[in-house]
């Protein structure tokens, strides 16, 4: 009923930038929180940034000042602008969205997009 499609990952040198996008489609009545998580090899998935319907944002300490999360409610899309990338930012990035659809408010995950930062 609801799908999340991510795009924008890739390979970049340290200090470079990437912009991730995650678009939700299907039967969507409303969207609450939207966020990005990442998982590095051998590590647990961690929250990178989140944005609520109010516009309030939250960032992991490791990305503050470098990453910016934003959303376009008309397009049901969340973005993650990543600047000054570091090798430790490497991982699979997943979007996570709370959506009210034909079923009660539920959490949905994107398929993941690989971000690789070379030193």
Image: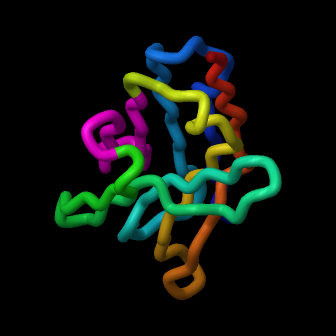
Q: Nearer the viewer, residue 98 or 81?
A: 81
Q: On screen, 1 above or below 102?
A: above
Q: What stretch is highlighted in magenta?
A: 64-82
Q: Which of 13 and 98 is in front in this view?
A: 13
Q: On screen, 98 above or below 25?
A: below
In which image quadrant can residue 3 be found? bottom right
**As drawn, which residue projects farthest toward the bottom?**
104
Give the side of residue 63 with respect to residue 89, left or right. Answer: left
Residue 71 percent coordinates (x, y): 32, 46
Q: Residue at x 49, y 70 (%)?
A: 99
Q: Magenta includes 27?
A: no
Q: Which of 22 and 91 is in front in this view?
A: 91
Q: On screen, 91 above or below 117?
A: below
In which image quadrant can residue 75 be found? top left
Asked whether residue 72 appears in the rendered view, the answer is no
Quadrant where the image shows the N terminus: bottom right
Residue 38 percent coordinates (x, y): 61, 51
Give the side of residue 20 with respect to residue 56, left or right. Answer: right
Q: Which residue is drawn at 49% across and 22% down?
A: 18
Residue 105 percent coordinates (x, y): 50, 82
Asked whether residue 67 appears in the rendered view, the answer is yes
Q: Is the magenta stretch mostly helix, strand or loop?
A: strand
Residue 118 percent coordinates (x, y): 66, 18
Quadrant where the image shows the C terminus: top right
**As drawn, which residue projects farthest toward the front?**
119
Q: Which residue is drawn at 81% across and 55% down?
A: 42
In which image quadrant can residue 84 be found? top left
Q: On screen, 40 above or below 60?
A: above
């Amino acid at each position: 009923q609801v799908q999340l499609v991510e795009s924008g990952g890739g390979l970049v040198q340290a200090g470079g930038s990437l912009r991730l996008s995650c678009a939700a489609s299907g039967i969507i009545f409303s969207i609450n929180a939207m966020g990005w998580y990442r998982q590095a090899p051998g590590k647990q998935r961690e929250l990178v940034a989140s944005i609520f319907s109010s516009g309030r944002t939250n960032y992991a300490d490791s990305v503050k000042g470098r990453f910016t999360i934003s959303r376009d409610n008309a397009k049901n899309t969340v973005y993650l602008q990543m600047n000054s990338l570091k090798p430790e930012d490497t991982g699979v990035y997943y979007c996570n969205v709370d959506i009210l659809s034909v079923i009660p408010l539920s959490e949905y995950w994107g398929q993941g997009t690989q971000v690789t930062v070379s030193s």
